[in-house]
Amino acid sequence: MKYTMRYLSLLAVLGGSMLWGQGSISGQVKMVGSGPPLRAIKMDADPVCSAAHTKPVYPETVTVAEDGSLANVIISITAGLEGQTFATPTAVVVLDQSGCQYLPHVWGVMAGQTLEIRNSDATMHNIHSQSKVNRAFNIAMPKVIKKKNQVFKKAEAPFKIKCDVHPWMVTWGAVFDHPFFAVTDAAGGYSLENVPAGTYTVQAWHESSKRLPAQTQTVTVTDGAAAGLDFTFTPVRRRK
Amino acid sequence: MDLKKEERHYDPEVLHRWFGISSLLFLASIVAMFGNDYVHEWKAHQREFRQADIGLTRRNLETAAVDVALRADLEAKQQQAEEQLATHQQRLDELAGLIELAEGEHHWATMRYQGSVADLGAERYQLEHALAEGEQAQKLAERFANRTAQTQAYKLESEQFQIEIDGYEAEVKRLQSDTKAASSELAELLREVSLLERKLRLIDRESMSTANKIADMIRDLPVIDFMAPSIKIGQIIINDIRDDVNFAVVPKVDRCTSCHLGIDKVGFEEAQQPYTTHPNLELFVSSGSSHPMMEYGCTSCHNGRGRGTSFTSAGHMPSSPEQGEEWREKYDWEPLVYWEEKIFPTTYTEAGCLKCHVNEPMIGGAENLTLGLAIMEKASCYGCHQIDRFEGWGRRGPNLSVVSSKLTAEFAFKWIRNPRSFRHNTWMPTFFAQTNNSSPEDVLRTDTEIHAMVAYLFNKSEPVHMPLRARPGNATRGQELFDAVGCRGCHVVEPEPLAVETDLDRMFQRHGPNLIGLGSKASDAWVYNWIKDPTFYNPETRMPNMRLSDREAADISAYLRGMRNTAFEAIEVPELDVAELDRIASGWLSKNAAEEDARAEVAGMSLDERLEFVGRRSILHYGCFSCHNIPGFEDAKPIGTPLTQEGSKPVHNLDFGSVHEIGHTNFEWFEAKLTNPRIFDRDKVKPYDEKLRMPNFYFTPTQVRAVTTALLGLVKSNLHPDKMADRKMEPQIINRGMAVIKGYNCQGCHIIDGRGGQIVQVIGDPAMSPPNLNTEGAKVHPDWLYRFLKAPTTIRPNLTVRMPTYPLTDSQWNDVIRSFQFLDGGTITFERSHTFVTGGASLAAGEFLASADMGACSKCHIMDGKNPTGNTADWAPDLALARDRLRPEWIVEWLRDPNAMMPGTRMPQPYIPSREDVDFEGAEEIFPRSVIRIAGDNEALLGALRDYIYSVGN
């Protein structure tokens, strides 16, 4: 009986995917020109931080490779999934505080998914979220506390989390009500898997949202096919 | 027949016919009367609303019953439980019988026991009596022992039966429990649904029983609708609010709800008028709000004729002429002529608040009205017009008894003639070159008057000793200081008028004058002395002492003096026309004397005497003394119409002159007057001294609307004290404190009661701006606050902006401190001191939690006189100040969740270990025992941190 049910549900899932189909979206994000000149972070304020690095550390505000590949861009579906609900993944998303920097610098979670905040440093950090839809929090994490779980209940556009003790520490997170989001890697690549067939609006968002404003494109996913979708950011000249 | 006919003076047949006709007419008129009485505007509204209500209820029912699956599930469960119960019916019946039997037995057993107890008592007495009398007691003692045993046996027997009953009942309960749980679960799920269904059964014929349906059909029919109609006048009677209906004062009766049927019902927000839900049910109308409909009615706030039951007779007023036209077309509307208190047009609704919120400096939620009152205060309307609300507020303009040490006569002339030629946004109004006094003759006269007034002011002006000698300064550094130390909490430097309209926040930023062109106005020495200590010139000024060093004052004064208004400097002052001066002088004199004598008297005066005479008369005429302290006018009476009850003034008392393009309502008159104070002199022929002389403030349309709202709110009112907003002591104290806070513009720099703090726009970072005073009353010790306000000390050395010193009296400071306390729900109690054991466990735990590895307080807080290492923006106050300054209860609440108390604060929630955090092998190597012992007990841990904070530096 138990097995029958299991097979039945498996069949239902397979049947469903055959009926509606699933595909993927992948592509690359590039930027025209180079990033702003960056100055090495001065970590002298906390000896624990400066001792963790032998080489100078630069802010990750705009991480662009020589060929223009742009990392740390959040790619997500913003329209086309209306009315569908998705299970919350049980896997945790890890945000580490290591060498007085946030790893990763940009991340996404699903609403209800656990964000595991780690402190790999032997110093106190405070995690100060600037979220608006979800309740803002600001908690201290002394070195003895290595892990702290945080759950965002509602979907929210990217927001900043910072450490007031180490003002250079900044990370950006976004909360989604679906699992179709990704952050571009150092080569600017990303892919969204198991996307139900359909037509979607996909957004590419970068934290320098004034200089590199978010952009959207429409893409159609067909059964079993991989749709390609590239983005190119052109910096907006600042007026005045 | 013929004979008989002739015997009469009338013809019966004709008479019968007429009788017939007239009875038919009579019948018809009765029918028409009933008909007329039956048909009403509001009845149609009620029918229409009932349909809308049915529609909404049905829709709600549909959406409420969404979880069909759950409902079916629960119903199935209930059914199952009932079926299950049915199978146990036999046993249940059996149990019922058993319970009945056992209860009977139990009753008898109890009776036996109680009888035995009574006997035992009697026998005890007999035994004790025998023992006391020394009689033979052997037998009695035996009997008593037997009786005791017997009683005990009866008791056990009775208890046995009770146990038996309890057992049976428990079994019944067990058998029924499933059914009960299922039905209560179902009832819980369907609670909303059943409420909606019950409502539908009342209003929706389709959901009614047949009998109710028939009753519903006939209950509203003519004639029988006197019994129990569903369509009837909605009426709210308020006994303690009374309407003055000429020669009688009667309780307020509001029938507005006859048509405004959805006003208190959620769900009609989008409905058409008159069914729309009130836009702010949280504050008004609903029974849980602070202004429930049943206690305040509708017309108490909105005005209008509450007894009216039609669109016109209720006294509706349109917001614009276009809306008026629309209403005429749609509702056959016309303004109610013989009812003064017509409904406020929606633009002016807030005027209704002022009746009860009499003394509130800022009325929460009434933005327009609050702005209007602030403008009245700023423009000093109460200087010329008696307004009780502002009684005793003093003169708000600069003190002119010492003017000659600040200004030149030339500046004064040009300024009086046209203040806006010097400063585009001054609050000093313009008297001259207005629509009724700009002819060449008028200009000649007014220029001469200004000459005379300037001469008067400068002759009477006392010299002021400037205590300090001006020093040269650096203007660039001065500008930086001007932005940094806090000047911009009250002052702007704005060369051009703003494109945006005034609002309250912008008024906080412009509390003091725009300092543009100061170099063309006052001398170096004066500016330097003024910013060092303004009381040297005006002991009553609201300008505080910024405690600037000589260097700082010199720099700021160099910056301010560097700004010149060359266009103003270039304006020529016309020569004094002595002939005109004489004409004006004899004109004034001839009011009380023959012209010949007047002219002779003028001829006998020296030029100085004539100037002084005309100057004094002109100052009196224009009312300069209303806002300025001028020697010789200390006791002069205000020259304007009293405005305390202006909103109640009948419209026919307002002179519309030849201005016909506006409607005959008080608000349109106010709007026109405020936009152009001389408008009602248009096409009038008047001698100069009878012309309208209210000066022009050049109000913007927003300002006109705001001031009109306030004027409409100033009404004659004899409200019961119970209805006043400040009937309790707390709001009275808050009002007094807030009046000081508003008068001295504390909100230019601080956020108080959720408002103000605009200086952050200049400073940029809230962390470097003056503190948010949210929860201040709960936060600091009142005696510390008193000492701080009297002589501010440095709390945040990283801030460049500084708390100035204000010359307030102790009672004013007390009002401020107490209003902080009451704003935070405080009471007048003695402050208890917080004590803890030095070297105790709590302190040790707190010290550990604050240590560098844990809370690391010293990363941001100044400790032991050492500044933190991070950005100055991240610095926090020295913890050694806490004990003296902060209340122990507040510290605990603050540590619990700083962000909840001060949204956006950089203070993180400190680390408070949980039980699990310390529950591992080797925990003692990290945590001291004092922490392990109380880990998980948040109150104790927060208390420990508080104790530690209190111990710092003490």
Image (cartoon, rainbow, N blue to C red):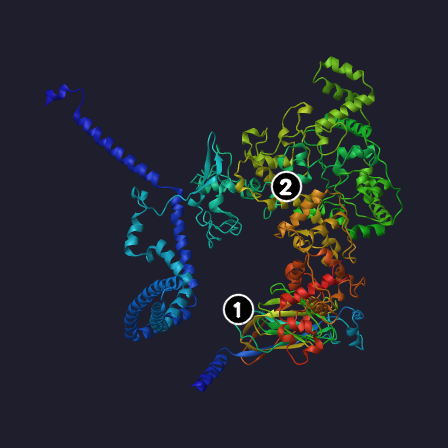
In this picture, is B470 found above or below B610?
below
Left/right placement of residue B260 relative to residue B500 reads left
Between B806 and B417, the residue placed more toward the observer is: B806
Left/right placement of residue B311 relative to residue A216 reads left
- Chain at numbered mark 2: B
Question: Which element is circle 1 on?
Answer: loop
Q: Nearer the viewer, mark 1 or mark 2?
A: 2
Task: For the residues labelled 1 and 2, say whether their Cβ atoms are less than 8 Å apart.
Answer: no
Amino acid type shown at disc 2: Leu
How many marks the image carries: the answer is 2
- For residue A165, say whether it is visible: yes
Between B825 and A17, the residue placed more toward the observer is: B825
Q: Which residue is mark 2?
A: B373
In this picture, is B30 found above or below A63?
above
Left/right placement of residue B701 relative to residue B585 reads left
Q: Position of residue B33 (x, y in %)?
A: 32, 36
- For residue A202, say whether it is visible: no
Between B399 and B391, the residue placed more toward the observer is: B391
- Chain at numbered mark 1: A
Quarter of the figure with the C terminus of chain B: bottom right
Between B922 and A204, the residue placed more toward the observer is: B922
Dots 1 and 2 on the same chain: no
